[in-house]
Image (cartoon, grey):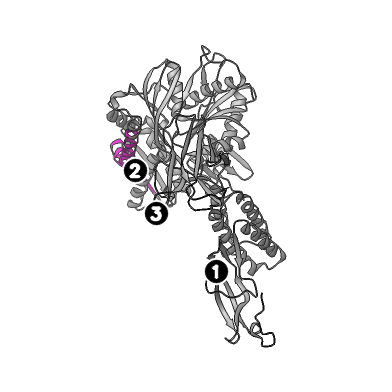
């Protein structure tokens, strides 16, 4: 544990860092360029990695080597960034880790001391996967993440402690990429969140997009050629759209210049036109504000103050909307870009002091109680009264954390049921099809074989950071069937990632761009990942991945017939069999119309039909055919040899 803890606002477009100074007051730490905000932009320049202002300045020159808005991809297992200048690929956590590492390095330089501990903020409406990805980004960056804190809560702490505010507060936090709406009650030293709402895909970026869509249409209408967003012209237009958005916060009109190929255009956009272009975004904001207040069980008359946070709240249209809807004047007394980091530093110092068993180094050495809520409902997949799998919510949204909820209404489905496939869900709708909720994790639990209807208890526990712990108990004898934390990447996410990599590998095969050696290396890595991921997993999840890998092996067998492929197939079959999956199509195997597809047939049709040559393996799962084998077949008359008088067993 380091002597100093910092608070990090890891933003979609800009990030900020704060710490408690010698006077016990939270203050922003400038970066190495001497400014308080660092662009959340990363440039891969060959072997060099550039973060922040320099990367943003070179965006239009190197659009295919520069990544921004990565916060929107946090928790997305399928996203990869492939810089044009290198052979590498980067996950969202890895890119965010580069930003975090730069922020911490700059903070240590300014504070002239080693910094290892940090609180990182996230949108209140981030789900479990997004929060986990953020924590992992910090760990990759070498940070000891002592807390993941909701951004509106951090902003409210900064506002409330600085003014000794007490009352019911509505925080509208519209940043570069996300919208959070939080209702809370503040006392002199207490902050109780009542409800949260928001949209992690609604922010200043979307208002930029409204301008970009309009400008591209106007440019083409004036005779300009179309261009892609990841082109130099596209990157330049995004920069100019962002500049126009900012100018329209203080001016009635803004000019946008576009140059592409041999055509140039000068476009004029008024503030009134910008409001109309953004009407659908404002409508969404209004709905989310109304929803959060309703979830808190309040009306607008119950609000004492409305606090605006986030750089996008500088747009007059946003302030006008909030004041019109709530009937309250908006408080803009805190810095919209710095309030979250300032509050994160305060919360970080409180947690740091508690861990060290010392009073917090805050002005007045005060203690503060912060009670946040679960932003999304949590539950499991279970059969409903009609025997149809559905989402069974256990923890309702906006329940105060830390919390523990026990559900005793689950039971086994059939007599002598041997196992339970546990699927933990995140979603706000009870009873819906599991396709409409997120599967956070899965586990295959072994059961004592009892009569159908034997009761099972599921216990959910959430800590202050929203980390989820689950326990499953057999209520017949009190046996603990399994428990664990949902803090790492879920197996389902791992498998989604494997599917993406397999799809890319398949594409390379189609384009004949992968040599034998490269194939070996990639498939070996994939095979090991599948072997790791299948631990504790039912074949319902593993099977699609394994079949996809098997199809690649089938294809590879035609191009690289060597011992490696044979050994890989055997190892794969071991994994399959542990999940109840068995291969079909061994030479000499009897042909069954339900398990085999025949490509060619030879011999006289007066004997038994057997597999002569395997074209494509098939598989069964628990006796059910999931993929038939494709074979060449032969009539084998030896089975009816008169000399033996009996069929031979094979």
Is residue 124 part of the magenta span, yes or no? no
User: Which element is circle 2 on?
Assistant: strand
Q: Is residue 134 above or below residue 334?
A: below
* 119 sits to left or right of 168: right
Q: Quadrant of the C terminus?
A: bottom right
* 569 sits to left or right of 125: right
The residue shown at (47%, 41%) is: 72
Of labels 1 and 3, earlier in sequence is: 3
Mark 3 nearby-residue class (10 Å; few <14, some 14–19, many ≥20): some
Q: Nearer the viewer, mark 1 or mark 2?
A: 1
Residue 233 in sight from this viewpoint: no
* 354 sits to left or right of 321: right
Residue highlighted by disc 3: 225
Residue highlighted by disc 2: 267
Of labels 1 and 2, earlier in sequence is: 2
Of labels 2 and 3, earlier in sequence is: 3
Mark 2 nearby-residue class (10 Å; few <14, some 14–19, many ≥20): some
Q: Quadrant of the N terminus?
A: top right
Quadrant of residue 610 within the rendered picture: bottom right
Q: Nearer the viewer, residue 17 or 247?
A: 17
Rendered image: mark on residue 628: 1
* Rendered location of residue 415, percent (x, y): 51, 53
Q: Which residues are magenta?
A: 264-290
The residue shown at (64%, 84%) is: 640
Q: Nearer the viewer, mark 1 or mark 3?
A: 1
Q: Nearer the viewer, residue 176 or 5?
A: 5
């Amino acid at each position: 544990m380091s002597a100093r803890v910092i608070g990090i606002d890891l933003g979609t477009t800009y990030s900020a860092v704060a710490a408690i100074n010698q006077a016990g007051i939270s203050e922003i730490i400038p970066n190495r360029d001497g400014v308080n905000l660092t662009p959340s932009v990363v440039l891969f320049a060959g072997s060099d990695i550039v973060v922040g202002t320099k990367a943003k300045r070179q965006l239009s020159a190197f659009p295919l080597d520069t990544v921004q808005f990565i916060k929107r991809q946090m928790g997305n297992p399928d996203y990869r960034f492939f810089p044009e200048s290198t052979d590498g690929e980067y996950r969202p956590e890895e890119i965010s880790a580069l930003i975090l590492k730069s922020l911490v390095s700059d903070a240590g330089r300014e504070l002239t001391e080693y910094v290892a501990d940090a609180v990182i903020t996230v949108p209140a409406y981030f789900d479990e996967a997004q929060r986990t990805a953020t924590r992992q980004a910090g760990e990759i960056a070498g940070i000891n993440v002592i807390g993941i804190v909701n951004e509106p809560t951090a902003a409210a702490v900064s506002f409330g402690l600085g003014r000794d505010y007490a009352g019911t507060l509505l925080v509208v936090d519209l940043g570069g990429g996300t919208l959070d709406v939080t209702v809370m009650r503040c006392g002199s030293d207490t902050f109780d969140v009542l409800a949260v709402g928001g949209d992690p895909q609604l922010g200043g970026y979307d208002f930029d997009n409204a301008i970009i869509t309009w400008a591209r249409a106007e440019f083409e209408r004036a005779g300009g050629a179309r261009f892609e967003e990841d082109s130099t012209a596209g990157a330049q237009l995004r920069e100019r759209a962002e500049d126009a958005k900012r100018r329209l916060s203080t001016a009635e009109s803004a000019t946008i210049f576009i140059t592409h190929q041999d055509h140039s255009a000068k476009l004029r956009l008024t503030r009134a036109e910008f409001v109309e272009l953004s009407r659908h975004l404002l409508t969404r904001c209004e709905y989310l504000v109304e929803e959060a207040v309703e979830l808190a069980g309040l009306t607008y008359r119950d609000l004492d103050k409305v606090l605006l946070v986030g750089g996008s709240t500088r747009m007059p249209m946003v302030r006008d909307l909030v004041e019109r809807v709530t009937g309250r004047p908006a408080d803009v007394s805190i810095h919209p870009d710095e309030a979250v980091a300032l509050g994160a530093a305060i919360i970080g110092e409180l947690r740091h002091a508690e861990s060290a068993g010392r009073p917090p180094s805050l002005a007045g050495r005060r203690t503060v109680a912060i009670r946040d809520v679960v932003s999304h409902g949590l539950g499991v997949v279970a059969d409903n009264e009609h025997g149809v799998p559905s989402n069974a919510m256990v923890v309702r949204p906006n329940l105060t954390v830390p919390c523990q909820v026990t559900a005793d209404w689950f039971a086994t489905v059939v007599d002598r049921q041997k196992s339970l496939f546990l699927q933990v869900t995140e979603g706000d709708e009870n009873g819906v099809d599991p396709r409409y909720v997120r599967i956070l994790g899965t586990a295959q639990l072994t059961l004592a074989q009892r009569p159908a209807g034997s009761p099972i208890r599921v216990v959910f526990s959430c800590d202050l950071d929203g980390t989820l712990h689950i326990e499953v108990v057999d209520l017949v004898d009190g046996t603990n069937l399994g428990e664990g934390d949902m803090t790492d990447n879920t197996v389902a996410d791992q498998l989604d990632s494997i599917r993406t990599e397999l799809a890319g590998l398949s594409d390379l095969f189609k384009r004949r761009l992968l040599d034998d050696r490269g194939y070996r290396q990639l498939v070996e890595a994939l095979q090991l990942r599948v072997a790791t991921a299948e631990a504790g997993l039912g074949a319902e999840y593993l099977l699609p991945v394994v079949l996809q890998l098997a199809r690649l092996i089938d294809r590879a067998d035609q191009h690289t017939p060597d011992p490696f492929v044979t050994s890989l197939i055997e190892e794969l079959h071991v994994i399959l069999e542990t999940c109840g999956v068995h291969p079909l199509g061994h030479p000499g195997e009897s042909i069954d119309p339900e398990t085999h597809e025949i490509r060619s047939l030879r011999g006289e049709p007066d004997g038994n039909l057997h597999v002569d040559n395997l074209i494509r393996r098939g598989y069964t799962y628990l006796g059910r055919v999931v993929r038939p084998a494709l074979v060449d077949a032969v009539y084998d008359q030896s089975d009816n040899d008169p000399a033996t008088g009996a069929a031979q067993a094979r």
